[in-house]
Amino acid sequence: MTSEQHIGHRFVEVKHEFETKKEIIKKDQVELRNSISPKYEEIAFELENQLANLEGGYEKLTTEISKQGEEWHREIDIVINKMKTEINEIKMKHQNILKKHLDEIKQMQSLIKETLIVLGELEKSTEISTTIEYISKIKKFSKHPARVNVLLPTFIPKPIDHEHLYNVFGQIIPVCNSVQENVLSINQLKTSVRELLDKPELVATIQTRYDALYSVTCLNEEIFWTSAGLSSYIKCFDIKGNLLRTIKTNFQRRYNDIAVDDDGCLLYSDWETKTVNKVENEHTEVLIKLQGWTPRNLCVTSTGDLLVSMYNDDETQSKVVRYSGSARKQTIQFDDEDKPLYSGNSLMKYITENTNHDICVADYKAGAVKVVNEAGKLRWRYTGHLSTTKSNPFKPHGIATDSQGRILTADSYNHCNHILDQDGQFRSYIDNCDLKNPFGLCVDINNNLFVCDSAKGNVKKIKYSQDI
């Protein structure tokens, strides 16, 4: 302290610093033992289980491919046998034609032989009357029969297009291998900061051939599911527009929503049966069966729960229910004054969860985006943004959130999307990508927006932000 070397330096009492470090060491020890170490053990256990089940899973896949091969072999044998049958039928027809003609020729030959015998006898005969009565048959026999020339059919084998054959046989859909970063402290790891582009960029347009495209949900950055209002089929496409899979459902006359769970399984609502269904591989099971209420729109949360917007049978009430599997965990229906949070009707109420666990609902009839916190308490409402170029009423359809906590909602009547921050403040429009009646939305892991262009039946992939 008396040394000139440390003049102006801050002095710390050693005892206090020692005790402080001791407390930190003790706290670290507790956190390592009680929190961090068990988490590593849990992850290691999960990895060991996955490794143990890996062989069986891939064996099942190869078995399915082999079964498909056997089915193809059976179908090829059917085609071959059908062609052989056709050839045999043509052969029998030609045989009958040739035999019939041959019989006619042999009959004429027999008549000619008989005539020759008669002529020989007449030539030697001295009977006047018989010779005078003879009538020549040369004219009859001189009319030679038409020659029959049977032409054999020709088989023209088509060249084998190996690439086309590979694609027709089936397709292996790679599931995005997601590695979840587990947060091991009370402070969450921050995602990279992204800024909005002044002019969003249209990355791709994928034709689905739907008449009224209403819903899209991303399986990963390359593959997505789609659903339409007037179709009983749910279709899976890749970003190049290839149709990868089609699922036949029972609904035909009304819109139903879709979502993808943490295992990559498709979920869809069915208003006719009042169910939420899960499709795993080729098997469909009922996940949730409602009574007195009809499911509308779906959202899988960051914790794996399922949020379902629904309406009652007389279409006077609406609510959002949180499920864990098939078990109901939470119901969100009224505000603190016991007034309905959502308009009571059967119209669309697209739903999503934000990064701060807020629940965001696009209430079409109310003309508002309504956001409640995780506990179901109303935080704010957004009823549109004053604009000289957007003159039609704000009636939100699809809704999605990105890694920055921004909320994107579709404004079909004004042919654009609104971008809000997590507190409901307007930030920007996406209105330059030739959108006509945007409906369903989803955002992939790279913060690209997928938009259902309902009027055209297209899905548009749009880049609207970039890393700073």
Image: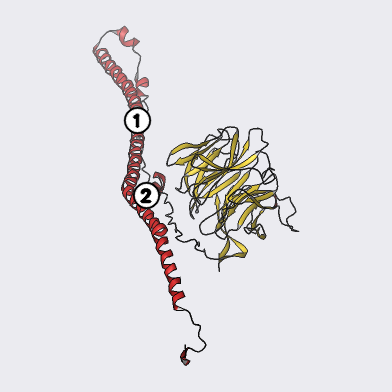
Give coordinates of residue 152: x percent, y percent.
34, 35
Determine which quarter of the picture holds residue 334. top right
Q: Residues within 10 Å of mark 2 (few under 14, many from 20)?
A: few
Single out the residue that lies furthest toward the left: 124
Q: Is residue 173 visible?
A: yes
- Is residue 326 rendered to the left or right of residue 126? right
Question: Mark 2: which amino acid?
Answer: His
Q: Nearer the viewer, residue 314 or 205?
A: 314
Q: Is residue 211 visible?
A: no
Question: Mark 1: which amino acid?
Answer: Thr
Give the residue drawn at x 56%, y 57%: 402
Disc 2 target residue: 162
Give coordinates of residue 156: x percent, y percent.
37, 42
Give coordinates of residue 426: x percent, y percent.
67, 59
Structural distance between the alpha carbons of marks 2 and 1:
27 Å
Please say which color scheme the image uses: secondary structure
Residue mark closest to the camera, 2 vs 1: 2
Disc 1 target residue: 85
- Is residue 57 rendered to the left or right of residue 398? left
Q: Nearer the viewer, residue 100 or 145?
A: 100
Q: Nearer the viewer, residue 391 or 205?
A: 391
Which mark sits nearer the N-terminus, 2 or 1? 1
| Location of residue 20 with respect to 412 vertically, above or below | below
- Is residue 144 rendered to the left or right of residue 465? left
Give coordinates of residue 99: x percent, y percent.
32, 24
Q: Residues within 10 Å of mark 1 (few under 14, many from 20)?
A: few
